Amino acid sequence: MGILEKISEIEKEIARTQKNKATEYNLGLLKAKLAKYRAQLLEPSKSSAAKGEGFDVMKSGDARVALIGFPSVGKSTFLSLMTSTASEAASYEFTTLTCIPGVIEYKGANIQLLDLPGIIEGAAQGKGRGRQVIAVARTADVVIMMLDATKGEVQRALLEKELESVGIRLNKSKPNIYFKPKKGGGISFNSTVTLTQCSEKLVQLILHEYKIFNAEVLFREDCSPDEFIDVIVGNRVYMPCLYVYNKIDQISMEEVDRLARRPHSVVISCGMKLNLDYLLEKLWEYLALTCIYTKKRGQRPDFTDAIILRKGASVEHVCHRIHRSLASQFKYALVWGTSTKYSPQRVGLTHMMEHEDVIQIVKK
């Protein structure tokens, strides 16, 4: 019995099992088995290591955004509109067969945009180069899920299921669970909150399924068995995702309004170039980037060349970006901008920078 058959068997059994107090341990065990088999499915088999090719795209720019969606939803048209790269677009499915990178220049940052081939149902099991597409998506900072507005709901549910099954968690934060395997001493279980979805017995059963008999577990929030399994496996990727509904010129205004009000959603039309500027604003917000400008002593700030960093970057991060030896020679810095109480403020290495701050670094 192959792994795929085992997975489908377990999925059928989960669907058959009625959810009540008596079966929740059984369901937890089945979910643990399912996660285990899916992990085996993602690991490439030893024999097929040389065959096939991945989409090897070098990471460039300040951030990476992956375009994911079914065939013929307008991914290539979107790439051609937003960047100077021309990606072939046609009215038949699977026009794009490999990964095509482009660069969006926005607010002084270079954002790498990857046009990936269309995903089909069963991509997580390797159908239609699905595994390579999903492997590239794991390396991105933000996922843009392109959906056809005329059939968006079905597509959204299917794509979320495909990405869930390979360990990509969209718009979710990491579960606040402390987990540490030990050499001995059994399983010590504690929680700082009242648990409604997990119990000590269920946690032990799941750990035994993974052949872990000695560990320390501390729940700091009320998590489900699925989230606890994610913590044990440890290779899950938590990333922000923007649901972009394309082709809004083909549906009614009421439907457009309904889609636009959904969380993490933007409605656009590539054909009529509608709402693309708002999408860029949203993308910038989800990437959480900040521009920092530098200034030499006695000169005006250089607003042409910004240093792009993640939100929450300190003066030390700025020093490392300019030159790796600068932090060791650092005396103090003068900062102008919204992160200071007055301008200029004399700060140390730990000062947190904000968007469009100006910094002047003084060495020892």
Image: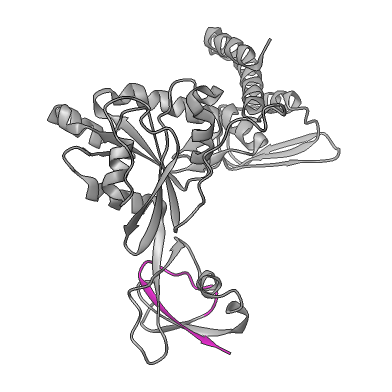
- Identify which residue, 235 or 194, lies in the foreground: 235
What kind of colouring is applied to the model shown?
Answer: one colour
Q: Quadrant of residue 326?
A: bottom right
Residue at image coords 19%, 28%: 255
Furthest toward the right, the residue is 184
> From which residue to which does the magenta span run?
348-364
Q: Is residue 320 left or right of residue 343?
A: right
Furthest toward the left, the residue is 253
Please state the horizontal and vertical placement of residue 156, each as a whole percent of the image.
37, 27
Residue at image coords 52%, 70%: 321
- Identify which residue, 323 or 202, lies in the foreground: 323
| Magenta residue check for 136 | no
Please state the horizontal and vertical placement of residue 228, each as a whole percent of the image.
62, 33
**293 shown above or below 49:** below
Furthest toward the top, the residue is 16
Q: Is residue 232 left or right of residue 123?
A: right
Image quarter (top left, top right, bottom left or bottom right) of the C terminus: bottom right
